[in-house]
């Protein structure tokens, strides 16, 4: 797949003739009664039950792990059975990091049996009691009738169970917002997070801009963060009703942090830094209905695919266009998504039912790409996007998070500020371990490869105070009187026990996505690896003299300014003008510095490895 992403970067989009069939529309996917994710309906004991012509519909069999639980019925359980069910719910909530989905009326093998109205009412009552016992709320996502093998209407109900937040441990998903300039990215975020529709002239986006020139031009040039919360009942929690960021965090069980990136080609390096450094869980590609796929849209799509960030698409400004224009833009997107370079299956979302199906399938299958058509001015279909974001599950389960938390502390420095009466503050993501207030860490590498001692004075997460930071969470750390001039983006703060590997020379297996001529030794490119962004020169191409578009090779790079902290296996993206390539780090030439503890020349409180 990687070599074919070059079609998106090179700007040569060949029509694929539509691909196999149209996009998934309406009630496809794992919706109860829909046949279970496109799988064929199965027969029970070789024949259809009840003598009906239709085979009984199935969902995929229930998985032992994960946060989805099938229950045929929950009518008047005994006390022992009830305690067992509560324990089971705790496990599912833990697997989903505070969220679980219950399918009521479904056997463990996935057979959609359904329940009568009375049985369903009793089962939901039991489920509500179970949720109260574990400190959670339940929300009915959808109901579906099953009409085989019975003359009495039988229903299946899908229920979202979400824990009420405790100790600020809400579920936090990061969504990077991509798209061409003037596609309506910042306006859409303003409408979602402020709770007020736009006036058609960009009023909703004004609160998101960080600089005067952004307000004057209407174009985002920096990375900004906006938060949208959902409470345990699935209701939106945002800045409407004059809430503060702290109140949104306190009221929310689930937080969506939008990373608003720049659309203009001039700010492409900022956009790439946002995608590589902030580790988004998902990306939202915003396309204007009236202009279609224009400018940097294809390039942003290629970046998301190259970095393997699952993305969904929002077609904005549908209020400006005729229905035919919107349909043309949808068809244009479907054609590109079905190309061999993308190999995606578009899922057009037209109803709440589609939004629930899209959220569940999107997390389970990397090939599904939901498409929304909405307006930030009229509010058309805006609720469908909120339903989707509310149900969207995390990509990592609790076990993977626990494993990361067992490792030594490692915090990536992405932003550096000076705050009056607080001192130096760094923003970034904790990639492993646990960070606490008052903890002593070391930060580096400096230009000469050293690491310096510092102390974490306080932590803020989503603009509210936090005592403990866990792996995968983004936050800002106050460092007190630490000299800001010693810090730069791309540094890491690690536990003193860790012996970090720093290097100026490294090797990577790359794919050259696009280059106008030939890629040779001595060529200089800007390399992005996580939060590291620096110019590097090509020292050697193993086994070849030169590379052309689409070719693979192992290449040795040398940073031209200062050493960096890298890990083997880290994703790499490099660019220079129209030249672009991706790959992963395969080898490091580690720099060995003196291991005699403190160096006198560095002054007190500064550590060298």
Image: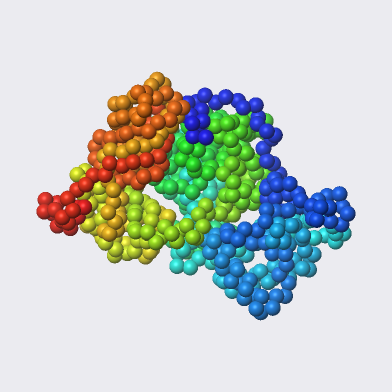
Residue lying farthest top?
A: 517
Identify which residue is drawn at 49% across, 34% down: 2
Q: Nearer the viewer, residue 607 or 300?
A: 607
Taking 105 as reference, is 270 above or below it?
A: above
| Image mark count | 0
Quadrant for residue 112, please give it: bottom right
Query: As rendered, which of 550 and 192 lies closer to the eye?
Result: 550
> Between 326 and 520, which is closer to the camera in this rendering?
520
Across and down, in percent, residue 434 comes to 37, 61
Tell me where residue 56 appears, x and y as whole percent: 79, 53
Q: Residue furthest front?
A: 543
Vertical position of residue 68 compared to residue 11: above or below: below
From this view, report whether residue 501 is shown above or below residue 126. above
Q: In the rendered view, how is the structure colored?
A: rainbow
Q: Nearer the viewer, residue 268 or 276?
A: 276
Residue 360 drawn at (x, y percent): 61, 51
Horizontal placement of 83 versus 190: left or right?
right
Name the residue rendered at 25%, 34% in the picture. Answer: 560
Q: Is residue 58 above or below residue 76?
A: above
Q: Examine the rendering and report whether any part of residue 137 can be seen.
A: yes
Name the residue located 49 percent from the left edge and 42 percent from the top edge: 308
Determine whether, in the image, residue 144 is placed left or right of residue 584. right
In percent of width and height, residue 214 lies at 40, 38
Residue lying farthest to the left in this orientation: 600
Looking at the image, the residue that sits furthest to the bottom is 79
At 19% from the left and 44% from the top, the residue drawn is 448
Q: Is residue 207 visible?
A: no
In the rendered view, does 113 fall on the left or right side of 524? Answer: right
């Amino acid at each position: 797949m990687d070599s074919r992403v070059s079609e998106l970067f090179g700007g040569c989009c060949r029509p694929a003739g539509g691909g196999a069939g149209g996009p998934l529309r309406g009630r496809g996917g794992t919706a109860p009664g829909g046949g279970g994710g496109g799988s064929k309906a199965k027969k029970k004991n070789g024949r259809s039950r009840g003598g009906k012509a239709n085979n009984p519909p199935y969902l995929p069999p229930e998985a032992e792990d994960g946060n989805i639980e099938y229950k045929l019925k929950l009518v008047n359980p005994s006390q022992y059975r009830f305690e067992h069910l509560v324990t089971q719910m705790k496990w599912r909530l833990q697997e989903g990091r505070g969220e679980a989905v219950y399918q009521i009326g479904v056997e463990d093998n996935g057979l959609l049996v359904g329940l009568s109205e009375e049985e369903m009412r009793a089962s939901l009552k039991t489920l509500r009691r179970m949720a109260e016992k574990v400190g959670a709320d339940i929300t009915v996502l959808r109901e579906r009738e099953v009409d085989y093998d019975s003359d009495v209407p039988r229903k299946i109900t899908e229920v979202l169970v979400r824990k009420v937040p405790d100790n600020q441990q809400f579920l936090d998903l990061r969504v990077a917002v991509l798209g061409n300039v003037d596609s309506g990215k910042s306006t859409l975020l303003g409408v979602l997070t402020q709770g007020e529709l736009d006036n058609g002239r960009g009023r909703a986006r004004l609160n998101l801009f960080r600089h005067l020139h952004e307000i004057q031009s209407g174009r985002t040039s920096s990375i900004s963060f906006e938060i949208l919360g959902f409470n345990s009942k699935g209701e939106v929690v945002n800045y409407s009703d004059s809430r503060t960021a702290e109140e949104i965090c306190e009221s929310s069980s689930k937080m969506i942090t939008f990373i608003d990136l720049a659309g203009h080609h001039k700010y492409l390096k900022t956009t790439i830094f946002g995608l590589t450094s902030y580790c988004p869980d998902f990306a939202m590609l915003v396309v204007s209905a009236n202009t279609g796929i224009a400018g940097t849209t294809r390039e942003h799509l290629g970046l998301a695919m190259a970095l393997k960030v699952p993305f969904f698409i929002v077609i904005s400004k549908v209020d400006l266009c005729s229905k035919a224009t919107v349909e043309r833009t949808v068809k244009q997107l479907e054609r590109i998504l079905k190309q061999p370079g993308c190999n995606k299956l578009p899922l057009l979302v037209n109803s709440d039912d589609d939004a629930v199906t899209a959220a569940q399938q999107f997390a389970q299958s990397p090939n599904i790409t939901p498409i929304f058509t909405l307006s930030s001015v009229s509010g058309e279909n805006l609720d469908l996007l909120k339903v989707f974001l509310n149900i969207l599950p995390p990509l990592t389960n609790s076990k993977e998070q626990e494993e990361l938390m067992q490792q030594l502390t490692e915090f990536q420095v992405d932003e550096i500020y000076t705050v009056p009466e607080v001192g130096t503050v760094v923003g970034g993501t904790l990639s492993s371990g646990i960070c606490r207030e008052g903890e002593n860490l070391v930060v580096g590498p400096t230009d000469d490869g050293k690491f310096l001692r510092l102390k974490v004075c306080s932590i803020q997460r989503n603009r509210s105070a936090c005592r403990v930071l866990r792996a995968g969470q983004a936050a800002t750390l106050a460092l007190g009187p630490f000299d800001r001039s010693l810090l730069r983006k791309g540094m890491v703060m690690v536990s003193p026990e860790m012996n970090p590997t720093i290097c100026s020379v490294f090797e990577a297996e790359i794919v050259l996505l696009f280059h106008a001529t030939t890629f040779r030794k001595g060529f200089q490119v800007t390399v992005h690896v996580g939060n590291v962004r620096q110019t590097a020169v090509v020292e050697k191409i193993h086994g070849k003299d030169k590379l052309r578009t689409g070719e693979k090779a192992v290449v040795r790079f040398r940073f031209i300014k200062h050493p960096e902290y890298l890990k083997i296996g880290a994703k790499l993206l490099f660019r220079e003008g129209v030249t672009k390539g991706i790959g992963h780090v395969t080898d490091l030439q580690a720099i060995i510095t003196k291991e005699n503890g403190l160096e006198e020349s560095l002054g007190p409180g500064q550590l060298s490895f």
